[in-house]
Image (cartoon, rainbow, N blue to C red):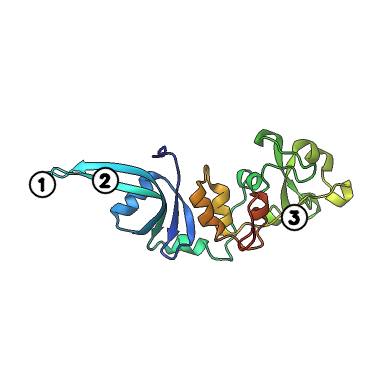
Amino acid sequence: MYELAQQVLRTDASGMPLEWIDYQQAVRLYHLQQVAYACGSPLYAIHGGTCARTGRRSVIEVNSILATFGNQQAINKARRNYTPPLSNRTLFRRDDNLCLYCGEHLPVTLLSRDHVTPLSQGGQDIWANVVTACKRCNNHKAGRTPEQAGMQLLAIPFTPTHAEYIYLQGRRVLADQMQFLLAHFPRTSPLHQRLHLPEPGTG
């Protein structure tokens, strides 16, 4: 069994990824009878109280992926027009902790958010205009565009879909959870290459 810190991937009843939840939220979903079905690997066996009549102790087994009923608000997030919130943590993970100017893999403490078109030149703080940059490259680029600074971007920034964003938020994504999420990534998702995985239907 896994440590209780391992996250559970929650989906809707049709299998659309919705969010990460902890074991307490998973048990609550079982208690409220909101679990449609479970798949993936077994994570936990949570023991409850003992029934006075039968003397048996209740056990709830929690798998790595839980499909649930309801919660229209969460389901709405998964629609195509949903734009996930931007944070440095998910940005750096989108770009695989790689400076998209010099190409060096670095720890988070040496990375920064760079605006491709600087804010001072009318650029926006949105996914499609930000990339991960090491602090040295960011300081060199300063308030210029890559062209003005004579620098070349190694990849085009993109806005993650909801399924991609869920992956980016995951603390430790298990293999079965990863395969489930990959099935919901767009075929052309840059993450297929950045995760060093083949696109669906290839390889």
Lateral position of residue 160 relative to residue 173, left or right: right
Rendered-image quadrant of the N terminus: top left
Examine the rendered structure and indicate whether residue 178 appears above or below residue 77: above
User: Which one is nearer the viewer's eye here, 122 or 28?
Assistant: 28
Q: Which residue sits at x=59%, y=53%?
A: 85
Question: Which residue bears the numbered disc 1?
Answer: 53
In this picture, is 134 found above or below 95? above
In this view of the protein, which residue sits in the foreground, 14 or 40?
40
Quickly name the residue at label 2. Answer: 59
| Total labels drawn | 3
Of callouts 3 and 2, which one flags the residue occurring earlier in the amino acid sequence?
Answer: 2
Three-letter code, disc 2:
Val
Residue ID for mark 3: 156
Residue kind at label 1, given as amino acid type? Arg
Q: Separation of disc 3 and disc 2 at Cα?
A: 49 Å
Q: Residues within 10 Å of mark 2 (few under 14, many from 20)?
A: few
| Kind of residue at disc 3 | Ile
Cα distance, mark 3 to mark 1?
63 Å
